[in-house]
Amino acid sequence: MKQIANSLSKQLMIDESILASWLEIPPNSEMGDLALPCFRLAKELHKSPQVIAADIADALVENELVESAVPAGPYVNFRLNRATAMEQVMRQIRDDDAFYHGAQGAGQVVAIDLSSPNIAKPFSMGHLRSTVIGTAIANLLESDSYQTLRINHLGDWGTQFGKIIVAYHRYGDEAKIKANPIQELNALYVQFHEAAQDDPSLDDEARAAFKRMEDGNEDDLRLWRWMIEVSLEEFAKTYAMLGTSFTHNLGESFYNDKMDAVVKEIQSLGLLVESDGAEVVMLEDVGLPPCLIKRSDGATLYATRDLAAALYRHKDLCADRLLYVVGGEQRLHFEQVFAVLTRMGYDFAKNCKHIAFGMMRLGGKKMSTRKGQVVRLQEVLEEAVGRAKEIINEKNPSLQNADLVAKEIGVGAVIFNDLKTNRLHDIDFSMETALAFEGETGPYVQYTHARSCSVLRKAYLLDAGVSPEQLVTHSQAIAQVDSQTVSLDDPTWELIKQLSLFPGLRNRAIDEYDPSLIAKHVLDICQAFNHFYHDCPILTADEPIRSIRLALTDAARLTIRNSLQLLGIGYPAEI
Ligand code: ARG
């Protein structure tokens, strides 16, 4: 597309990038590989779109990449020279750095706030979304040379701890809690909410307990520290399973000693006003409700801690851009925090972005910790891995490393199910659908990857389990083929076209913070590869076709692997 736009731009004296953005992929491939709508040119060139289309068609066929071009009303539809295009795509893939990596972000630091579960509560399916979307976005940014700070902003401070402490003293059974800490602490939290409905004074008691914590009461803090310890132990299991890592584990409490300075700064700027005893920043001129900075009893709030955290990330961690991968229900909160930063005169506020996402439903049901209807992610993951193991035992009982592969498939299924949908949409999780080897699933993609590995293993007589990474990249063979002498069939051509779209889609996924573009595209690649695999014999073909098909198999393998890597999903070489 770039090349065509370049040569057209010389001919039409129109900016190359504008032309590139006008080029379309026709709705069905019968019409051609690409199309250019000409009505937008009519005004500038003072000719009818039909006449322009005919002129452009004549000029296009001069291009070595173009096989044929026909005007169709106001459009030009054209076909590419398959062999020439293949050579170019394969050359780019071989030059791995330009195809799979970019350099847009060199020298820039992006802080990504992700996962951020709450202490003393189970790690829910809801936090899964933040973890996997945040990780995929971080991977995408890194593939474009950004330095990423992956920050786990653990919910380890706030009134909820006052509530748990009150409930612990009132209804807690120490032995029971010690035996099963997270579940019991969560149960106490639920019990507190039920009791507080009848007795509102409990809320005051909880507020007082939290205030005691903020004032440094050792007894309360000891209990709180223990809650953190048991929670982190539990979260660590989930992170190990997902393969998630962070560069920073900084809970909300980390900012306790940084809060005074922020409040003072807001005050000295004349932004702090009193409202019902509390201290707030008014934001009505930007159409937002006031941002609560300090409660009437002097306790700080979620927003205050986020302000301190933003300043820390910008000033101390030197982040140029601050991303927050947090559910859409917190939109107002982030709008307020960013508006206060702007009001404080911080220019970097315009580089702060809330990366919102929809809700995760389980069998159609919404989940909430207050009502205690939480599905523990760990259980879901363990079940997915268990089922993947059963499938493997059935399909390939002699598989080496079966436990590791089962983990990659089970966990990959859960991650892929999440990432294949645009993040803003609500998604429903069903174990059966996510784990199917057919359809738009992680296992389908992993299976296709393993299939491409297996073809290459057979071609090079490698032992089962040997990763094709150890191969001399076969795409080199392409260079030795006199491509003008071969004619490429439709399934081969479809695969080449799909592969060629990867760099453009990766760029879009980065610009839009949308990993689903990668997930959907890898499904298209897998579909194209599987058609190619069924319709075109690879190992038994005559040269030079055999070499070309093997090279394409290798290119498909590499592109599927890179996509899975970006999504944070494993890619076993054999299933
Ligand atoms: N712990 C919060 C929750 O579970 C999410 C924190 C998001 N990050 C932030 N900087 N506020 O709702």
Image: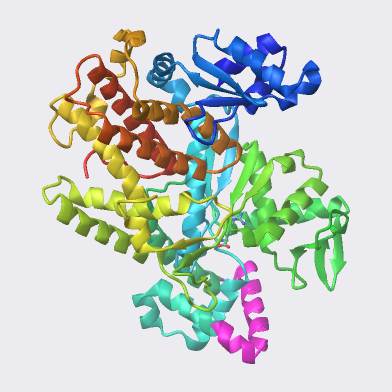
Q: Is residue 215 above or below residue 312?
A: below
Residue 515 visible? The answer is: no
Q: Is residue 394 left or right of residue 187?
A: left
Q: Which image quarter is the C terminus in?
A: top left
Horizontal side of 19 relative to 417 (left or right) equals: right
Q: Quadrant of residue 278?
A: bottom right
**Count of numbered badges drawn on the protein:** 0
Q: Would residue 215 be counted in the magenta stretch?
A: yes
Residue occupying image coordinates x 63% and y 86%: 202
Report ligand 1 position as a quadrant.
Answer: bottom right
Pinpoint residue 83: horizontal percent, then vertical percent: 39, 15
Residue 108 in view of the camera:
yes
Which residue lies at the image location 37% right of the left edge and 48% below the top edge? 243
Q: Main secondary structure of the magenta part?
A: helix
Q: Position of residue 321 (x, y in %)?
A: 64, 39
Q: In this figure, which colouring scheme has been used for the structure? A: rainbow
Which residue occupies 57% across, 86% down?
Answer: 194
Image: magenta residue range: 192-217
Residue positioned 31% across, 32% down in the render: 532
Is 518 inside the magenta-drawn segment?
no
Q: Position of residue 77 (x, y in %)?
A: 57, 24
**Taking 207 as reference, is 439 above or below it?**
above
